[in-house]
Image (cartoon, grey):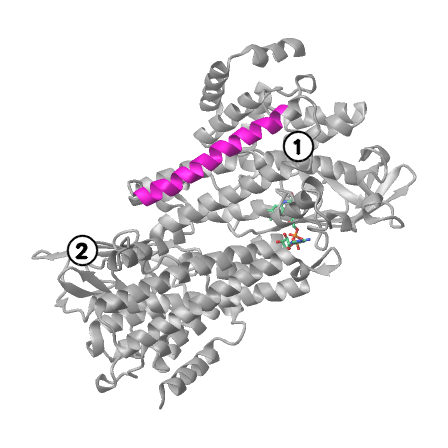
Amino acid sequence: MTDLAEIEMIRDSARAFVPPGGDLVRIRGLRFGEAGFDPAIYRQMAEMGWLMLRLPEEEGGLGLGMRAYCALAAVLGAGLVPEPLIHANLAVRLLGAGVGDAVLAGTRIVLPAWQAGFDGLDLAAGVTGAAGGLSGEKRFVYQAAGADAFLVTGAEGGWLVEAGAEGVSLECEGTQDGGHFGSLRLAGVSAERIDLIDPAAALDEAALATSAYLLGVAETAFEMTLDYLRVRKQFDKPIGSFQSLQHRATDLKMQLALLRAGVDMAAGALDAGVDDARRSALVSQVKVRAADTAMLVAREAVQMHGAIGFTDEHDVGLFVRKAMTLANQFGSAAFHRRRFAAMQPYAAA
Amino acid sequence: MSLHSRNDIYAVMSDEEFRAQARAFIEANYPDIPRFSQKRLHFSQSKPWYMALARKGWVAPAWPVEHGGMGLSATKQLIWIEENERFGAARINDIGPVMLGPLLIQFGTDAQKAQFLPKILSGEHIWAQGYSEPNAGSDLAAVRTEAVLDGDEWVINGQKTWATLGNDANWIFILARTDKSVKKQAGISFILVPMDLPGVTVRPIENLEMHDEFCEVFFDDVRVPRENLVGAVNQGWTMAKALLGHERVFIGAPRLSSSALARLDLLARKVGVADDPAFQDRFTRLRLDVADLTALFETYIEKLRHGEAIGADVSIMKIFQSELYQRISEEMMAIGGATAALLEPFEHDPRLHAAGTYLMARPTTIFGGSNEVLRNVLARMVLDLPA
Ligand SMILES: Cc1cc2nc3c(=O)[nH]c(=O)nc-3n(C[C@H](O)[C@H](O)[C@H](O)COP(=O)(O)OP(=O)(O)OC[C@H]3O[C@@H](n4cnc5c(N)ncnc54)[C@H](O)[C@@H]3O)c2cc1C
């Protein structure tokens, strides 16, 4: 199959789960629930091969590239899908086929517990695996309550930790989108150290997929807003006829065009093969625009809807909350600007 | 104590003395209710604070002394705001003191002033603002809620929406259509309606902070006495605009921006970016914006104190304040890292709640006249540009 055909195929299969306009009744129903997502739907998604997208064919995976992965992520974002596919894919990416069939089949959910600080992409901090077992804390583990096990990362590699194991405790806090973050505390947990596969690349890929997801979120919020500008009337005219709103809507379209081009460009470059420094610079470039654009579209969407945009009853708010939840995941815009500048330093001529 | 000697109290007090008094009063009298709450508290929770202010005579810092206010100078009003924000005191249900009171002082009959002002000051009447309707938002003059005179009573039918804390209020002032045969601005009247009457129904609406902070209010053959009309029949648009002027001074006050700036400062220290020169530069920019806004605010307060009318240019302050507040909240989201995604305050400290600040800053550019509409007004009325 050609690359393009593969991308089309994955987009179509994604749309089966995320009908145009999204299944927002399902999304609302899952908000603020215990797992924050639906394990049965997660399994169905796994059956589509979505957890083995990036796994090489010789290891039994689909061997797809970042372009296909980003196409999928954008559709998931458009439908605000709460199943933590990007996070689960990160765990698979770090472990390879060794992760086990149950994980790839979606019957066993393994989520990465990689972050300890507030921001950035440091997966080493927080936990140490001394002789007495694994100890420390990982935070901001997205949708942690739904996990059977965690892939805990440290400076020397990773550890698979069962959620119910001795010495493991999990405390969850809600996130704006109706999901949650878990704080995972480990006190002398016995677990075997595993080598992680190219962690820096894996995190960059997760950051890029998150950018594509944010693109889907922002594009849909933008479409909803355009629809509203066409139908809402004040002063006997559609509000979309007012020039100040037309100009601002156009500005949003510009940002979305830049973001989409950036996602495509970076995904294509990663698929073609680039060195580590170039990869990270490209991903940072895209994640900056993704975070900033999603947040910009979110606030303009509220503003252009007027008071109804500030209600929880109106669906546009679901997109605002998703943007707020994901904008800083896998590095905020501020972090990625710093990283880009460090890699491609500004030098006076 | 006579009104006159109360007048002397604040006029002769030095600003430092007043600040010390305000601080001591708040610290000694603030009840056991949340501080620094991002969500508005309902009256059921904040009532003891309203009552403490009422006992002290401090419900209406801006009203003239002869009507039971504190008659504070601009500087002292700012001090009062600062001390409240510094302590994190909850905002009271202030539509009565901030909006209706000044309107009645300007346009009410002596009987209306005597009937309503003391009850605002005592906390007996909690007011809601019934302007907007589903199809009359920015185009406020399109209101369709109708009031028809039947003998000595107005009979009211229709629907209002987005009434802030309407579920706490026992009175609501509304704009109602009293003449359909004229240009839409010329057929509106301003009417005071008790909310416990038969035919009044309130439906709370959850906002993005998951809080039932605004309401729909339905009127079904609601009857109020003829004297509940303020000003003259069909002069409601004049009242509406005057009241919005007071609302815009209130929204234009540096209160929201300066308290958000203090939150940003705390959050920056918490997440470890306070030493970053790039952050410090952005912070300084925001700080100077707050400082300049404060200077602008003082000029409006002084105008009000000297009985000058507030012109269309007040929107300059409303727009700048609301957008500054939003920019500060956006900076909180930008530096907050993962904490910016949280639904409840990080580490249970409301001051570290980036998402809450971000969400609560959204509607300030929508209510009190949306910033788009106010820019249109400024372009026409202040810049005198062609339509
Ligand atoms: C939190 C909150 C509290 C509120 N509290 C109250 C209250 O207590 N009492 C009350 O009566 N109302 C209240 N309101 C309502 C508020 O006054 C209205 O939301 C406001 O007037 C805008 O009306 P709308 O929401 O219908 O938006 P719309 O008028 O439908 O506007 C939608 C968008 O179109 C833009 N737009 C409209 N006309 C133009 C134009 N000519 N040119 C350019 N852009 C334009 C607006 O700026 C906005 O961005 C509250 C609103 C909020 C959000």
Give B187 or B310, whichever is nearer the viewer.
B310
Q: Is residue B83 magenta?
A: no
| First to last magenta residue range | B277-302
Query: Which residue was labeled with disc 1?
Result: B96
Which of the 4 quarters of the picture holds residue B303?
A: top right
Query: Which residue was labeled with disc 2?
Result: A127
Which mark, by number, is residue B340?
none
C-alpha separation, residue under disc 1 versus residue under disc 2: 55 Å
Is the shortest distance between ligand 1 and the CB of mark 1 under 8 Å? no
Residue drawn at 51 percent across, 45 percent down: B361
Q: Secondary structure at mark 1?
A: helix
Q: Picture coordinates of residue B383 (x, y %)? A: 67, 42
Q: Amino acid at mark 1?
A: Gly
Residue drawn at 22 percent across, 71 percent down: A275
Give A25 or A274, whichever is nearer the viewer.
A274
How many numbered discs? 2
Q: Residue furthest bottom?
A: A1
Give A194 or A282, whichever is nearer the viewer.
A282
Q: Picture coordinates of residue B91 (x, y %)? A: 54, 34
Q: Picture coordinates of residue B192 (x, y %)? A: 76, 36
